[in-house]
Amino acid sequence: MKKLPKGKTPPDLDTWLHEIEDVTAIVQPEERPSSPLIIEDIPSSVSLEGVYNANSFKYLAVGDLSNIDRNTAEKFAKGSFKIEARLDLHGYTEKTAFVAVQEFIINSYAKGLRCVLIITGKGQRQADDNWYEPKGIIKDALPGWLNHIDVRPFILGMTPAAPADGGQGAMYILLKRHRS
């Protein structure tokens, strides 16, 4: 918006001031209430029971297939489901892997995929590491990420992959059916 030089007024302002010269304000008497205004609690007309609440999902442990029918659970645990998408987390940092997992699960669900594979790797050992201690930051964090409030509603189950698909360094994820 252009600024006008000092002392100049826009042409519309003169017209406006001319039009409102004979306008007078209406003064209304102020009526004060005799007692304070009290509003009763209004009962809700909406029942919140059955409404989606991400906190209502129980923690899903690796291998817990109790919320899946027996035939599907057996087929899923054996690795007989067709893997429709893969996410390989080799080379990711913990932070970028978390974001990648969230996006992968949400996008896979949106595409209507049912069984996906997330490859974490088994973890890299250093020469001075204890060989009897499990290793793998991303591998250990993955079950918690899959139980995150933004991702858990899309997941039915998770189980370690068959040796041909990565074994202990990979995880099958069974997604809920996408109902539109």
Image: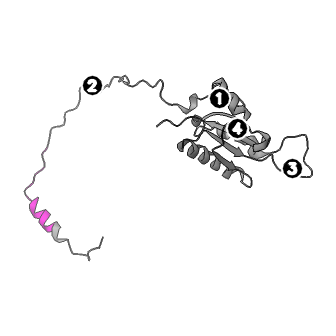
The answer to which quarter of the image holds residue 23 is bottom left
Which numbered circle lies on residue 35? 2
Side of 152 where 51 appears, left or right = left
Q: Quadrant of the N terminus?
A: bottom left
- The residue labelled by disc 1 is 72
Picture disc at residue 143: 4
Nearer to us of marks 1 and 3 is: 1
User: Cα distance, mark 3 to mark 4?
Assistant: 21 Å
- Along the line of sight, which residue is nearer the eye, 141 or 121? 121
**Percent position (x, y) of residue 45?**
36, 24
Name which residue lies at 78% across and 43% down: 164
For discs 2 and 1, the disc positioned in front in the rendered view:
1
Label 1 vs label 3: CA separation?
36 Å
| Left or right: 3, with 114 as reference point | left
Helix, strand or loop at mark 4: helix
Q: Which kind of residue does numbered mark 2 sit on?
A: Ser
